[in-house]
Image: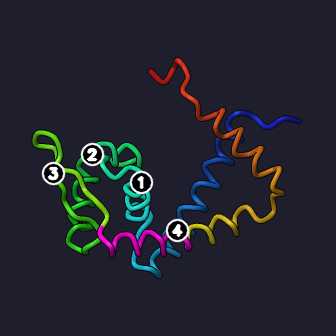
Amino acid sequence: MSPSLQEVGLAVKRLQWRHHRAANTALAAVGLSLPQWDVLRHLRSLPDASLHDLAVLTFQTDQSMGALAVRMVERGLLERAGGPGRAVRHRLTEQGEQARRAGGEVMDAVLRDSFAHLSPQQLTQLYELLLIAGAASPSDD
């Protein structure tokens, strides 16, 4: 018997919730929260991202991303950089890069533990299915 759409949605949410709890607990050991590590990760790959871009990428509001960025600057993880017009951009500091790497190792361990029971082929299939399911649809507009 096939699962209902609600059951599939709940299974995705349960896995996400498990990852978030495990990640926040494990990241605390290296002095980061999941949102902080996520900001560091995205700034590494998109160094000129605006605060709004970072808010969207990290599933936060512009206001909460701004407050988080201020705290991260105060901790020495980020530095402010000028942007076009009045835009303020942020960049990783050396301390921020070190924290990103440490957080990445923690996240790899959390996810490795979570997906250990999947074969490489199943993991690839899961990834491909999630990409398909996450693709924009006409109802997203």
Q: Of the residues under marks 1 and 4, which one precedes in the sequence? A: 1
In the figure, is residue 67 to the left or right of 106?
A: left
Q: What stretch is highlighted in magenta?
A: 93-105
Label 1, residues with CA under 10 Å away: few <14, some 14-19, many ≥20: some
Q: In this view, does 123 lie above or below 110?
A: above
Q: What residue type is labelled 1?
A: His
Q: Residue at x 22, y 54 (%)?
A: 66
Q: Do the residues labelled 2 and 4 touch (CB within 8 Å)?
A: no
Residue 50's label in the rendered image is 2
Q: Name the residue under label 3.
A: 82
Q: How many numbered markers are drawn?
A: 4
Label 4, residues with CA under 10 Å away: few <14, some 14-19, many ≥20: some
Magenta-colored stretch includes residue 34: no
Q: Of the residues under marks 3 and 1, which one precedes in the sequence? A: 1
Q: Nearer the viewer, residue 16 or 116?
A: 116
Q: Which of the 4 image quadrants contains residue 68?
A: bottom left
Q: x and y percent of residue 116 in the render?
A: 77, 65
Q: Which amino acid does label 3 sit on?
A: Gly
In the figure, is residue 123 to the left or right of 33?
A: right
Q: Main secondary structure of the magenta part?
A: helix
Q: Residue at x 30, y 48 (%)?
A: 48
Element class at badge 4: helix
Q: Mark 4 points at which residue?
A: 104
Element class at badge 3: strand
Q: Name the residue under label 1.
A: 42
Q: Of the residues under marks 1 and 2, which one precedes in the sequence? A: 1
Q: What residue type is labelled 2?
A: Ser
Task: Kindly report the distance in space between the C-alpha atoms of the residues bearing marks 1 and 2.
Answer: 11 Å
Q: x and y percent of residue 119 in the render?
A: 84, 57
